[in-house]
Amino acid sequence: MKNFLRAALMAALFAFFAAAAPVQAQQLTCRDNVKYDASTTGSTRIFTANATSPNQVYICGYTINVGAAATNVGFTYGTGTNCGTGTTALTPVFVLPIAGQIMDDAGIWHGLTVPAGKDICISASGANPVQAILYFTYQ
């Protein structure tokens, strides 16, 4: 009888933990990209949500290069002119040295999400050449 109770308890515990297991996240592959190549200071809109609203934007990766001066660069989202309303950081501000580069191009979505109806902007600390590409999908 003792072994039967032990087996029943183990089966109940297994069923409990199996039901509580997390659902595997959906794997998204990016099919779109947006490029930026300018020497502007401040925030610049690089993706307008109007075409995709009411869809969320899922970021799969990005590459940022800077020119002949150290520059702080990051991605934000918001609304209004150059994400000036409700500005929210999408990435940290990367402190890039002269001719610096940062890459995050996993090719699949790994957590960066922009809410529906929000534009995506890139922010640079100086009028230094910055080239960037952002890979994304929306649904």
Image (tube, helix red, strand yellow):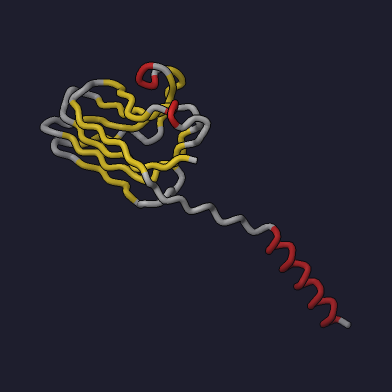
In the image, taking residue 113 as reference, residue 31 lies left or right, namely left
Asked whether 104 or 3 is in front, the reply is: 104
Residue with the most extreme right position:
1
8 or 127: which is nearer to us? Answer: 127
Q: Is residue 40 left or right of residue 47?
A: left
User: Image point 82% across, 82% down: which residue?
Assistant: 3
Q: Where in the figure is residue 134, as x and y percent of width and height? A: 32, 39
Task: State left or right for residue 70 relative to residue 5.
Answer: left
Q: Dividing the image into 4 quarters, which one contains the N terminus? A: bottom right
Q: How many marks?
A: 0
> 93 or 134, which lies in front?
134
Give the residue at x 39% y 27%.
Answer: 48
Q: Position of residue 111 (x, y in %)?
A: 46, 45
Would you place residue 22 above or below residue 40 in this image?
below
- Tell me residue 80's x, y (percent): 41, 17
Q: Residue furthest front?
A: 51
Residue 15: which quarter of the image? bottom right
Establish if 5 lies above or below 94. Answer: below
Residue beneath the point at 18% across and 36% down: 97
In the depicted structure, whether residue 22 falls above or below residue 43: below
Q: Quadrant of the rendered structure where residue 58 is? A: top left
> What residue is rendered at 69% in x and 62% in y?
17
Single out the residue that lies furthest toward the left.
68
